[in-house]
Amino acid sequence: AKTRGMAGQYYPIKLFYTSNMPIILQTALVSNLYFISQILYKRYPENIIIHVLGRWEEPEMSVSGQMRPVGGIAYYISPLNSFAEIVSDPVHALLYIIFILASCALFSKTWIQVSGTSASDVSKQLRDQQMVMKGFRASSMQRELNRYIPTAAAFGGMCIGALSIVADFMGAIGSGTGILLAVTTIYQSWETIRKESNGDAMKMFG
């Protein structure tokens, strides 16, 4: 989305407004849940409440000794690695998709509040730069930005989550989240280099 600013200029609101932060926060949440669930399951393997959080087992012929979830919440938020697994356990697939999309959207909307990129923060920055939106008073600028920024953040977070899901389902080398983080980090670095190069070029002609 683009919001018209002073003198016909546009303030760009990107689709991936919060970049890859939603999937980073979602991965951290799941990792912590796995860690706590495994510790509790090893200590209280017969506790029914612990079973709801997650049941774990060590795969046969496992060399690393790494356990995998086979039941409970930990199982249903774990990724599926192929379309065959989706067909064999559609409930797991559906709950996993809902969890990823909802958590990424929620984390994305939360992140704009704590990172200084919410509608109120952007409105303040524009006022400090003496910029106004054409056809709107300065007092109503925040309300207008609030129509776009939270929506862009939530939808962008869901898109990031969807890309991660597709990568997982296709059985990509490595996790879908890892691949997504690598690609978005490289793209952000490229954007930073391009902006710096454009800035240097402007200084040469300035």
Image (cartoon, grey):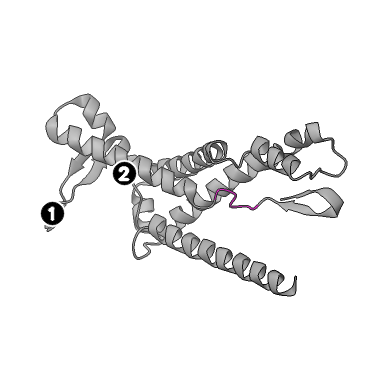
In front of the other: 90 or 81: 81
Please tell me in which quadrant of the rendered image residue 44 appears: top left
* Marker count (numbered): 2
Residue 13 position, x and y percent, is 67, 50
Q: Is residue 16 magenta?
A: yes
What segment carries the magenta color? 14-18
Relative vertical location of residue 16 with respect to residue 183 in this rendering, above or below: above
User: What amino acid does circle 2 point to?
Assistant: Ser
Q: CA distance from mark 2 to mark 1?
A: 23 Å
Q: Quadrant of the C terminus?
A: bottom right
**Residue picked out by circle 2:** 31
Relative vertical location of residue 95 with respect to residue 173 in this rendering, above or below: above
Of circles 2 and 1, which is in front?
Answer: 2
**Residue picked out by circle 1:** 60
In front of the other: 160 or 54: 160
Disc 1 is placed on an element classified as loop
Residue 117 position, x and y percent, is 60, 42
Label ID, residue 124? none
Q: Earlier in the sequence, mark 2 or mark 1?
A: 2
Disc 2 is placed on an element classified as helix
The residue at the point 67 percent across, 35 percent down is: 120
In front of the other: 120 or 150: 120
User: What amino acid does circle 1 point to?
Assistant: Glu
- Apparent side of residue 137 relative to residue 68 in the rendered image (left or right): right
The residue at the point 85 percent across, 38 percent down is: 136
Q: Tell me, yes or no, if residue 45 can be seen here.
A: no
Residue 127 position, x and y percent, is 75, 40
Main secondary structure found in the magenta portion? loop
Please rate how many residues cluster around mark 1, counting C-alpha atoms within 10 Å: few if below 14, some from 14 to 19, many from 20: few
